[in-house]
Amino acid sequence: MLSFSVPLGKLVRTLSRLRGGGSAFPGLVVEKIDPGFMQRTLASLPLGVAVVSGTNGKTTTTKMVVELLESQGLKVFTNRSGSNFTRGVAASLLGDVDWRGRLDADIAILELDEAHAVHFVNKVEPRFSLLLNVLRDQLDRFGEIDKTARLLEHIASKTTDTVVLNREDPRVARIANALNTLDAVHHPEVRYFGLDESLRSTFPNDDEMRTTGIGPSPSGTSVAAETGDDVDLAPADVVLRRVGAQDADFEFDGETVTTSMKLRGVYNIFNAAAALSLARSVLGTGPVDTPKLVKALGEVAPAFGRGESLTVDGQPLELVLVKNPSGFRLGLKSFPAGGYATMIAINDNYADGRDMSWLWDVEFDSLREGGVEVLTGVRAYDMALRLQYDDVHFGVVEPDITAALRAFIDGSRGKPKRVFCTYTSMLAIRRELAKITIVEVVS
Amino acid sequence: MTSEAQPTPDTQTLPDAQPSKGTLRVLQLYPREMNIYGDWGNALVLKQRIKWHGYTPELLEYNVGDEFPDDVDIIVGGGGQDSGQLVIQNDLQARAATLKQLADGGAPMLVICGLYQLFGKFFKTSTGPVIPGIGILDVETHGTDERLIGNVTMKSAEFGDILGYENHSGQTTLGPGVEPLGTVTKGAGNNSKDGHEGARYNNVVASYLHGSLLPKNPAIADFLIRTAAERKFGSFVPGTPDDGYASLAREHAARRPR
């Protein structure tokens, strides 16, 4: 079986690539003819498997962990974004193994969607897991936030060595307690990444999202508030202390390190703390070249659509992916509107989430001064209605993304531009932009 | 499909010179625990439309352990997760008499999803325990393993077509003491069987629909405001809110798949 399934799977992969077809199909083929392929291949890695999961920031964080570990000379296997489910992992593996089925890597860093991660860890127990956050995202898929938290808890319970948790997200931080009470087979070490107190207010969690008509709750139900502000939080392995315009301070091993950052947006930079903590766990007690690690952190560029900047008409055009209310609020906070022309693109396809309620959990006051130039996407009129109720002026409302993008570019010549977009509208916008500028088009 | 922008007309925000027709107080029930699907949208729409109709809105909130304000004109409450429902359960029971007196006396209320269930007689969860409701609405809810999720459209004699989005696993059946809010034309509604959605009792409107409900269904918002104004001032003198974008959003939403 071994000598036959891998070449066949690779052949299917090559053929389906030539056809321009589905990325997971070869994974399906190899799963059918050699069900042990993925487990066997991943089990051969000397440092095992690390899983990155959570609602927001998986893609950028995974990219950061990979680059951090590569800076230390490790060979890293990772799954391409968009194949963050078991069969996708198998398909990605097929691309990287040699014809005898050997994977030339020290460790696999896998980005996995919460629900798929549960299936994955039942097949392959990860040595490390990094659990980022539980936010209101695609609730129509998972039902409720607490249910999503239980999915992450399951991932943690299957982790053999170290679980890295977000100390500032109460639903994630609580997983540490659950690990103690569960009849867990493994008792992984728990590490946290955390925020300086001065930054906590910029990271509302979902419980704090809306408790008053006047503004966000002063205390909400962050862990700190639940236990009383004076109670010490668990010590964190890595703490994000400060975010500047182009640099940030991280504290670890009792020292604060300042580094320039290519990443934009406070939430991306908080995820850099997460990535740093996971990388430190993987590197363990072995020798760590800290200056190189910090340098690599500073050089990570955003993943597509996560605040990346393109050039259109000699002006920057930034794409900010917004998938849920917290992400949208953080996006508005991280990328101030001043001096920019703004477009908002809202689709409600399956991958975006069909329920439009989330738009009402975002405050758009910060756009009031400059207004919004163009609204587009299938739910452009829902967005218009939302802005009307926040007294934010807007220009063109055009559901067709191609026409809207043209109107946006023509109407805002000579100005830097920013587009807040849901997932499928971002894909459509990238396809259009690819006709006029250099864009990595992701299918 | 392009529609040129009109800046929000000045008639929508009351010129300072024009005297207010009076203050209407809107109370949000448990916004800290029951806010899961854009429930703020309903409170915001009431606040803005009260203003656009020429009155002065005052938004209040009631959370577990707070003192219950004795002078409220509209009550609005939202959905929560199971954990949120457990947190508010005892406090809600302690406020049951007050709320029932208000509802029986004709106070306008809007309760969505989780609070709709708890305004009923009980919620029997799928795992067994029964959460008692406060019995304002003659409805009962049974937890199931089936989740009813997706876009909903329904017909209501009172409000015309109502649009929204449902996401619930509790199935609610109506007793003789209430009327359905509407009959679904797409989606499930109260349960997977009888085609009814929501409940009406006195001036209480109860529904499973998020979206949020009021932005795309301004007729319901205006019913709550009109009722409140008539109870407080004896009459309601409407303003002229611009519902052009609400109409367009409704048209587009109605065409979306389940």
Image: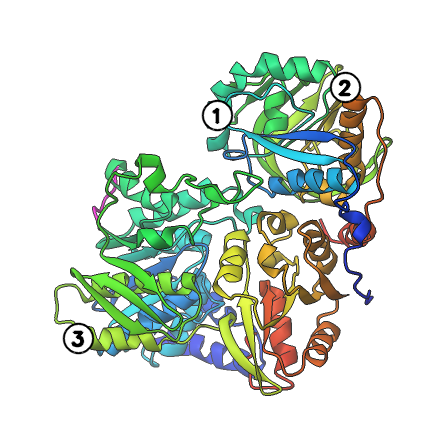
Q: Position of residue A81 (x, y in %)?
A: 46, 69
User: Which residue in the protein does label 1 denote?
Assistant: B64
Tell me which numbered mark, 2 or 1, is placed earlier along the sequence.
1
- In the image, the segment drawn in magenta is A183-188
Q: Quadrant of residue B36?
A: top right
Category of crowding for the residue at label 1, using alpha-carbon neighbours closer than 10 angstroms: few (below 14), some (14–19), many (at least 20): some
Category of crowding for the residue at label 2, using alpha-carbon neighbours closer than 10 angstroms: few (below 14), some (14–19), many (at least 20): some
Seen in the picture, residue B151 relative to A424 is either above or below; the reply is: above
Seen in the picture, residue B97 relative to A174 is either above or below; the reply is: above
Badge nearest the viewer, 2 or 3: 2
Question: In the image, what residue type sits under mark 2?
Answer: Asn
Category of crowding for the residue at label 3, using alpha-carbon neighbours closer than 10 angstroms: few (below 14), some (14–19), many (at least 20): few
Q: Secondary structure at mark 1?
A: loop
- Say which quadrant the C terminus of chain A sits in: bottom right
Which numbered dot is residue B202?
Answer: 2
Question: In the image, what residue type sits under mark 3?
Answer: Asp
Q: Position of residue B92 (x, y in %)?
A: 53, 20
Q: Chain of mark 2?
A: B
- Say which quadrant the N terminus of chain A sits in: bottom left
Q: Secondary structure at mark 2?
A: loop
> CA gap, disc 3 to disc 1?
52 Å
Asked if badges 3 and 1 are on one and the same chain, I answer: no
User: Which residue in the protein does label 3 denote?
Assistant: A289
Q: Are marks 2 and 3 in contact (CB under 8 Å)?
A: no
